[in-house]
Image: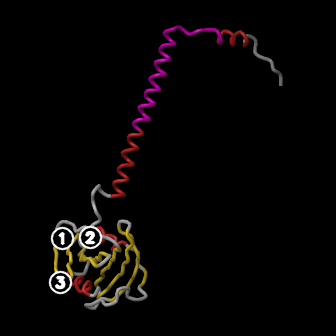
């Protein structure tokens, strides 16, 4: 391949290297470059602000509102969602009122380990959840009931009845969509 240049190419290169654009044109080019830099900085700043808002919103969703504590109702949701395997044996023998163990599982509630058990009595189903080391908050609207030396918290959230109580080192929650509060209290009495 030859290293031959077109005629006049050297002259064009020399003129381009030594020619100066008019001052007005140079000023407009510099202004447009400055404006482009400013637009990029604004866009980058806006993107950073949007990212910060999204990260904050995600953190709030994952952690919950500031200053809140996991409630009995939150634990009830975990009990209903926990995966269950068939029960080999009743993890908490002594159920009363005709309840029999049907399943067992594990869950986490606000970072605490929890054990779940499913119970049945006829067509009624209930889930029992024990959260170790927890102190679940009692939500507004909950009723309190003292039976012997045990204090229960009773509440209803949507179509779910919830009975909860504390025992040394753990909080206990029994939930059901179809069993009454009285039926759940019978199950809880054997725990």
Residue identified by numbered label 3: 147
Q: Position of residue 92 (x, y in %)?
A: 35, 86
Q: Among all residues in the image, which is located at the extreme front?
A: 168
First in sequence: mark 3 or mark 1? 1
Q: Residues within 10 Å of mark 1 (few under 14, many from 20)?
A: some
Q: Nearer the viewer, residue 21 or 152?
A: 152
For this rendering, which residue is in front, 137 or 107? 137
Helix, strand or loop status at disc 2 = helix
Q: Secondary structure at mark 1?
A: loop
Pick whichever of labels 1 and 2 is earlier in the sequence. Answer: 2
- Look at the numbered discs 3 and 1 and tell me whether their residues touch, using CB distance below 8 Å: no
Residue contact between numbered discs 1 and 2, judged by CB atoms under 8 Å: yes
Residue range corresponding to the magenta coloring:
17-46
Quarter placement of the N terminus? top right
Question: Label for residue 72?
Answer: 2
Query: In x, y percent, where is residue 135?
Result: 29, 70
- Residue shown at the point (16%, 68%) measured from the top left: 141
Q: CA distance from mark 3 to mark 2?
A: 19 Å
Mark carried by residue 107 = none
Is residue 21 placed above or below 145 in the rendered structure? Answer: above
For the point 32% across and 76% down, the residue is 169
Report the label total: 3
Taking the spot 28% from the left edge, 91% from the top edge, the residue there is 98
* Residue 57 x, y percent position in the rendering: 35, 50
Secondary element at tag 3: strand
Residue 150 position within the rendered picture, expressed as x and y whole percent measured from the top left:
21, 82
Q: From the image, tell me which residue sits under label 1.
A: 142
């Amino acid at each position: 391949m030859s290293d031959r240049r077109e005629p006049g190419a050297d002259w064009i290169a020399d003129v381009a290297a030594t020619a100066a654009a008019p001052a007005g044109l140079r000023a407009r080019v510099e202004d447009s470059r400055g404006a482009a830099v400013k637009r990029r900085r604004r866009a980058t700043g806006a993107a950073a602000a949007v990212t910060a808002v999204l990260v904050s919103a995600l953190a709030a969703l994952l952690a919950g509102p500031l200053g809140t504590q996991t409630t009995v109702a939150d634990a009830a949701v975990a009990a209903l969602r926990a995966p269950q395997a068939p029960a080999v044996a009743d993890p908490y023998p002594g159920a009363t009122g005709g309840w029999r163990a049907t399943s067992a599982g594990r869950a986490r509630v606000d970072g605490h380990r929890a054990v779940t058990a499913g119970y049945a009595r006829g067509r009624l189903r209930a889930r029992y959840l024990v959260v170790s080391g927890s102190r679940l908050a009692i939500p507004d609207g909950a009723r309190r009931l003292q039976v012997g030396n045990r204090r229960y918290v009773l509440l209803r959230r949507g179509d779910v009845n919830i009975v909860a109580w504390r025992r040394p080192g753990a909080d206990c929650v029994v939930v059901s969509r179809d069993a009454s509060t009285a039926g759940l209290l019978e199950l809880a009495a054997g725990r």
